[in-house]
Image (cartoon, rainbow, N blue to C red):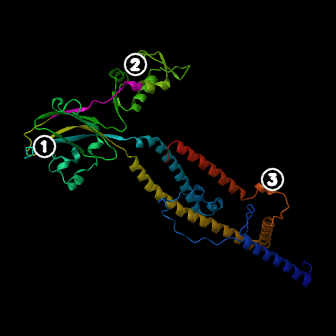
Amino acid sequence: MRPPARSRGSRSGAATNQHQQQQQISNHNQKQGPSSAGFRQNTLSLPPLPPHRPPPTEDKENATPKIKEHNLTLPANIIDMFDEAKQYQQLLDLEHQIDQKIMLRRIKNESLIKQPLIISKRIRIFVSHVYHRLHSATQIPKWELRIEGRLTDDCSPSDPTLPPSHQSTLEKLISNKTNKRFSDFFSIVSVELDPTLYGTTQNVIVWKRDPASPTDGCVIARNGDSDIPIRIRFWRYNDPQKYKIHPYVAKILGLAYGTKTSFVEALFLYVKTHKLQDPHAMEWINCDYHFQLIFGVARLKINELSLRIQSFFLQFDPIVIEHTIRVADDVKPMIACYEFDVEISETFHSQTTSFLESFEKTINNDNLKISNIISRIKRSKELYDATTRFANDPANALHDIIKSQSADLQTMKETFSGREPSKHFEYYLHPNMKEGVDRYLFNKVAQKRAELETNLCVKK
């Protein structure tokens, strides 16, 4: 059955009204820009595919932006269409499992990576002196004492007994392999002269370590024309500071030397092993016979252990060297060498961090490329669905476009008098609402994960 025929005037009038309405909508869209009226979707008015841009490798801080996980995931309708998409999804699931295991292993090994590695080395101390005899009878003779030190691995290969002050700048750079200097091993060096010659107030010269100016040693010059016995004391430098503890406490804890933290940990281990914590009042400790002898009380609070144990800390005994400055050594400097053991702390945290950051940067670059490809795939799928729908039912497609544009125009003109969509359940049944909810939940999970990683010190 054919529909009833219309007159030419009515047809032309409807066409004119429809043309004016579309012209008004297009003109208003050109002035106001895209509408913000919720999740309405225009089936045919899809923008063209974005041109392929190479992913940026460096930004202002020489770092690649991290790609969010939802940008690397393909929609379910695309995964069902292609076998390659299913294989990609399986690969993505496997990557998530590997990332989870790596993160757990990284949390467990974080403390071990940050903990410095203590290496025992031998340092060679050069003590040299020379007399400056002057030919004029009016001038006073002087002597000069030099105290220098280098690791045995950094000494001159041609002459191991040659101190750094007798080497050229090039020889120092070549021989110093570990980049360690005298001030890296000692905090204080004192030289005690004979009090019968220099008095009791000026016979001790003290050199102190300055972190801002590393040096290979110290120089002392005084007046004198006779043999002078001296005593040199060296106090080691440790970072963190190490102490020795009272012998009785060391016998109980099984630890004679260490840092404050190590002694406190040994105390808590002793309390836990001997079950000294009060089961009814967990903040109190019931002291046994040894603790009563050490602290002098029968009960004490557990948070007082770290304060009470500090009174038993003792400084390390200095290394003492006896030396004599002889007048007979006025022709050339007399050099005496001494060797003893020192400890070097080397941390692999910086090397490990740089190693992991290089791989993380490569992974982020690859993720950015994948994200761009997936974005193009999604846009292509949207364009394919729109063209397919228009090809199958062009009338309804055009009707949806006009309806959506009219609703947007009414909203922009503030002439919308209908019910608020957000107050009715039909609004939340919109197909695009699921994507908004998924993004909101993903952002919340990512925020909680970042807070957890920060608390666990996983990231800087």
Mark 1 / mark 3, whichever is N-terminal: 1
The label nearer to you, 2 versus 1, is 1
Q: Position of residue 66 (x, y in %)?
A: 53, 57
Within the image, what quadrant is residue 142 found in?
top left
Q: Which mark is residue 130?
A: 1
Would you say residue 430 sits in the magenta stretch? Answer: no
The label nearer to you, 1 versus 3, is 1
Q: Amino acid at mark 3?
A: Lys
Mark 2 / mark 1, whichever is N-terminal: 1
Q: How many marks?
A: 3
Q: Is residue 195 left or right of residue 388?
A: left
- 76 up-or-down from 209: above or below: below
Q: Is residue 294 left or right of residue 154?
A: right
Q: Residues within 10 Å of mark 3 (few under 14, many from 20)?
A: few
Q: Residues within 10 Å of mark 2 (few under 14, many from 20)?
A: some
Q: Quadrant of the N terminus?
A: bottom right
The label nearer to you, 3 versus 2, is 2
Q: In the structure shown, which secondary structural element does the residue marked by tag 1 occupy?
A: strand
Q: Nearer the viewer, residue 71 or 149?
A: 149
